[in-house]
Image (spheres, helix red, strand yellow):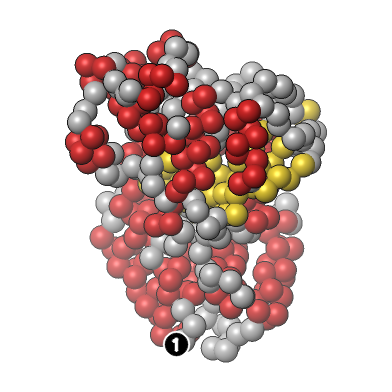
Amino acid sequence: MFAMVMLARLLQDSATLHRVYPLIAAADDWVGNLQRATGHIRSLQLRTAHLETHVACQWLLAALASLETLPAEQSPAFLTFELHRDLATISDPYTPARERDILLLRQQLLRHRLLGMLPGDGPQIPRIVHLIKTDARTSDLPLLQYLCYRSILEHCKGFRIMLHTYEIPHGTRWQKLLPHLELCIAMPPQLLGNTRILGAAHQSDVWRLKQLIEYGGFYFDWDLLLLRSPQHLRHNVCVMALERLEQGYREVLGVSAIGAEPGSQFLATWLSAMPMVFDPDMYVAHSTLLAHDLALRLPSLVRVLEYHAFYYPGWGEQAMRWLFDPAECLPENELHEHLAASTGIHLFCSHANFLQWGNHLTEKDIESPRCNLAKLMHPYL
């Protein structure tokens, strides 16, 4: 089931495919913009060197062609009717896979156009951040995760920041955070298909997708250190980044930072496919691996960024040295220049490599920063 093609070499094509969405959402000249979007994709199809992009262009052209029958003047009610009508065909188990994938693209195009007609910021990712706590920890928030949350508060001012949890967390650090968070108390997902979800991390995998599909916004893991505002990513219908490829491992799509418009077809397809591959003993089968495979099949539904966006320096030994070893410490200006392409850094705090290096990092170490990670976290003390 695992595709051997690497998404990394298709990144430029991914960016080009997603240029159709502003044309579809434009308020004027529906017919002309539809023609321009079609011409744009035909041009990409002719010049691409990748078979996967060629196929994606075929499907996207078919989805665009299906929109040609729509009237030039459309209303939200009309587009909503079209979305509901297509849904029955997508849900029909006898619908051929190719037709279903084309309809998924049509749904995303129509949803994006509909968002442009509704009150609000227009067709873009809402100013919402979703944080999730599913673990049973009763102690206070650990220092590094606390500073990660502080970084999100700092760079997402004006955003609605929602903490999804099954109980109110306690502790001195939590008490400092809670006034800035919108608490959403609810039971974490308990089932994936007919399989009971026991692991807190697996519950979070499902919960984040459900919240993003319903509300839209950004999801960030509790060990995601945000370096700057995600504002520049809001024009995407759905956006994720590759993890840094480590020697001896498969390329995967990171799930610690996800942005999406409400109703994202990529996230909905991913969530519906999870039960078929979910294996509690294979930690990432339904998450980073499945997301990667779906992104190869449906590249027009998710904009894929290169790993520097959220997963530099990675989780390997060399990455840990760069984060923690004083000998690797860069001057302030060089450090920020080095991370110019990064919106955030996923710290992989549960990985053995991080635990070995990071367990002994204290608040005093961060107050007088002697390593790159301490320098990056110092502003959030």
Using the image, determine if residue 134 lies above or below residue 154.
above
Residue tagged 1: 29
| Quadrant placement of the C terminus | top left
**Where does residue 367 sit, x and y in percent of width and height?**
38, 25
Residue at 34% across, 60% down: 16
**Where does residue 107 sit, x and y in percent of width and height?**
60, 65
Whether residue 33 sits left or right of residue 335 in the image: it is right
Whether residue 114 sits left or right of residue 35 in the image: it is right
Using the image, determine if residue 84 lies above or below residue 136.
below
Q: Nearer the viewer, residue 37 or 211?
A: 211
**Where does residue 380 sit, x and y in percent of width and height?**
44, 36
Crowding near pointer 1: few (<14 within 10 Å), some, many (20+)? Answer: few
The quadrant where residue 274 appears: top right
The quadrant where residue 58 appears: bottom left
Q: Nearer the viewer, residue 272 or 60?
A: 272
Which amino acid type is marked by label 1?
A: Asp
Q: Is residue 144 visible?
A: yes
Residue at 48% across, 18% down: 351
Q: Is residue 297 visible?
A: no
Q: Nearer the viewer, residue 214 or 121?
A: 121
Residue at 79% across, 37% down: 187
Q: In what element is the residue under mark 1?
A: loop
